[in-house]
Image: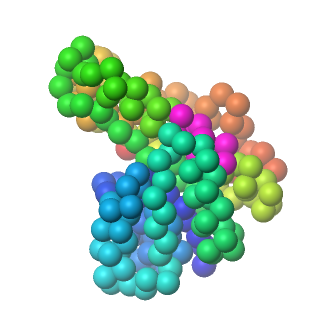
Amino acid sequence: MKTIVMTGGTRGIGYGMAKAFLARSCNVAISGRTPEAVAQALARLADPGPAERILGVPCDVRDFAQVQGLWERCRDHFGQIDIWINNAGTGGEHGKIWEASPESARQVVETNLLGTIFGSQVAVRGMLDQGGSDLYLMEGGRDSPDCCAGGCPATWDGHHGSGYRPIPGPPPGLGTREKGVQHHCRYC
């Protein structure tokens, strides 16, 4: 039975993936920024069951110590982590980018960039210690002329990514194969 850990698993695509992995008899750990969001998602996921295969851990991916704590709690609970999915992300305020607050911009950058970097650092170190696993990086966005992935940075609405344009291959410094650690990039 595989164990999957997912940042940003309390709603949206992350929650949907958690549900799908549970349906395939995997152990699943989800995280979200607030204990309330995690508790609500756990209650919904445990409804069809089984609760013993589900773990929820509040974790703000902008805080390296919390991300490290997420890995340790999941490893201690399940024994080994087979797949780590960096899915946490935020689009900030909806509307025109020049009208967004500086705090919203900071939150987008810290969550989407630092969160992915911290998650990758923690996961790869842990995977190397346990002899390998798979790391997935999720990049959100929309295929529309108004989305930066489509080319125009005029709106802030719905952006989950940070650079908004898929870059082929792994991020700089993250090789595709490092002593049994397999890296995957998924754009949605």
Which colour style is shown? Answer: rainbow
Q: Is residue 44 left or right of residue 53?
A: left
- Residue 178 in the image: above or below residue 5: above
The residue that appears at 43% across and 85% down in the rendered structure is 50
Q: Is residue 2 left or right of residue 100?
A: right
Q: Quadrant of residue 64?
A: top right
* Callout count: 0
Q: x, y (%) of residue 59?
A: 48, 53
Residue 119, magenta (yes or no): yes
Q: Quadrant of residue 177?
A: top right
The residue that appears at 40% across and 26% down in the rendered structure is 106
The residue that appears at 66% across and 62% down in the rendered structure is 72
The residue that appears at 54% across and 61% down in the rendered structure is 5
Work out which residue is located at the far left of the displayed protein and give it. 95
Residue 49, magenta (yes or no): no
For the magenta stretch, what is the residue range?
Answer: 114-122
Q: Main secondary structure of the magenta part?
A: helix
What is the quadrant of the N terminus in the image?
bottom right
